[in-house]
Amino acid sequence: MKKASKFEKIAARCWNLLNEGKPFTPIFVIGTMLLYHFNGIVEFTELKQLALSFILVLPLFVIYYVYDYPLFLRNYLWIPYIVFLIIWKFVNVKLLLLAVGLYFFFTVFFWGTLYYHLRIGTTWWNFTRFWKLVLKNSDSTSGNAQEQLPKFLLLLSLWEYNYVQMQHGWTSLALGQMFGYYIFVLAFSWILHRYLFDWKPDIISTYTNNISVPERPLNEKVIVIVIDGMRKDRFEQANAPFLKSLRERGTEFTQMETVYPARTVVCFTSMFTGTYSFEHGIHSNMVWKLGIKVESIFDSLRKIGKKGRLLGIAHLVDSFGDDVETVTAVMHNDVADKNIIERAKLIMEEQDPDLFIVQLIATDQTGHSRGVLYDEYIEKIEEADSLIREYVEWLEQKGKLQNATLIICADHGQADGIGGHGHLDEGERYVPFFMYGPSIEQGKRIDRKHSLVSLAPTIAYLLGAPYPSHSRGPVLIEAIRKKGNDEKAKSDRIFTGT
Ligand SMILES: [Zn+2]
């Protein structure tokens, strides 16, 4: 099992520029314009005019970077474009066709077929399915055609219009009109996001205070297995006997909510700091400034001389630095999770961490490359089930589970389309979440709503570490066994029995 190389870490960051919708829009528009004006640029005649006209469109780039028009709001993006057509009556068919062609070439062939084939071994025929996924997709990536199309069509039209206008010279009236138009788009975007974007999870307003950390730690170990992107309803449909038996014998949280935006790096950062984007500083998978602004559970453990490790993809280094053991994301998806479990055994043997977090990635990757509403996705969940069984049996044999809590969850679900996640579309918001072990209540089901930000303080509580500095989630105390039943519980608790 290979670690992620330095090259892969850098490549992963570069890929995010094209993968995340926000940086993609300006990069794509600028690239398309340069290509369209290629001859003029080579001869240096058009470059200056292109640059000057670009400055005139800059305000719209900024507005469209800030406002991502999530879910149904993206339908409203056609209104600024229609208003533009009415005011300026300007259509450059050749340019727009070039852009649409490039866009579908990039998403369907480059990303959906070539990239996935080279990285995780997806079939060369993936484009036959992927175009449908791109059209439906609703997340915050560049694969969200219904968001990207109206955005780049308008940006290109307006830029080209300004460019042509330049040759005739600008009047102050025309400039005033343009400025007025930007005010309109800004006000329009602000009002839509302010009044219609109302499905973000509520932020817990206080820091963790529902209980203080016990003097003696409850557990020697906590093991968290995150099945990345495992959608709750698809987990229910899967034949996953081991995980479901753990859930039955432990405590399940049926309404465990992820955070916004539900992107992997954001979710993991919230899960292991106990707080939200605005505080930990990670707002998408594209991390501009490395490192988090608050303490993580790893920092808490260090304070009491304990050690936590996270085995996961290279992107997570952006948040947690050296606390991450990276796995390479460049391997055939059929062996990815198997390799990760092998590596997880090795780390447990060599480093014996007190907290060990393992991220399984194959379910998420299948969702992204093949869609979540197909059988392949369910099969990956079933594979994860048997791999986790194998790992837990191994841990038990090695005596690592004598006094341990096992937590199984997902970081987010995935929506229809390219298994997207971010804006909390159907299937993304609530994740499977259950705990099992001698300190955990048996056969309990908690239907009250909870948030993944409770994970960090709950781990701190179990291991007797201080809560991370900005931890907001309450400790999941409902799952923790009341004193007195402890000894009996320990004796009749076997992880792999049924
Ligand atoms: Zn994820």
Image (spheres, rainbow, N blue to C red):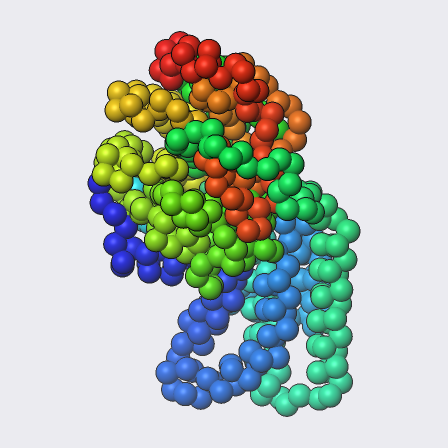
* Pick the front one: 40 or 273: 273
User: How far across and how far down the image is residue 76, in percent?
Assistant: 70, 53
Q: Is residue 189 visible?
A: yes
For image coordinates 61% across by 69% down, the residue present is: 62
* Pick the front one: 88 or 477: 477
Quadrant for the C terminus, please. Answer: top left
Q: How many marks?
A: 0
- Relative to 393, is 318 above or below? below
For image coordinates 73% across by 60% down, the residue present is: 190
* Pick the front one: 125 or 202: 202
- Relative to 428, is 434 above or below? above
- Relative to 227, is 81 above or below? below
Residue 31 quadrant:
bottom left
User: How far across and how far down the image is residue 143, in percent?
Assistant: 49, 50
Q: Is residue 416 visible?
A: no
Farthest residue, direction front: 215
Say whether residue 440 is left or right of residue 110.
right
For image coordinates 61% across by 75% down, the residue present is: 57
Say whether residue 264 is left or right of residue 331.
right
For image coordinates 46% across by 14% down, the residue present is: 487
* Pick the front one: 327 or 156: 327
User: How far across and how far down the image is residue 435, in percent?
Assistant: 49, 25
Residue 78 quadrant:
bottom right
Quadrant for the N terminus, please. Answer: top left
- Relative to 259, is 59 above or below? below
User: How far across and how far down the image is residue 299, in percent?
Assistant: 44, 50
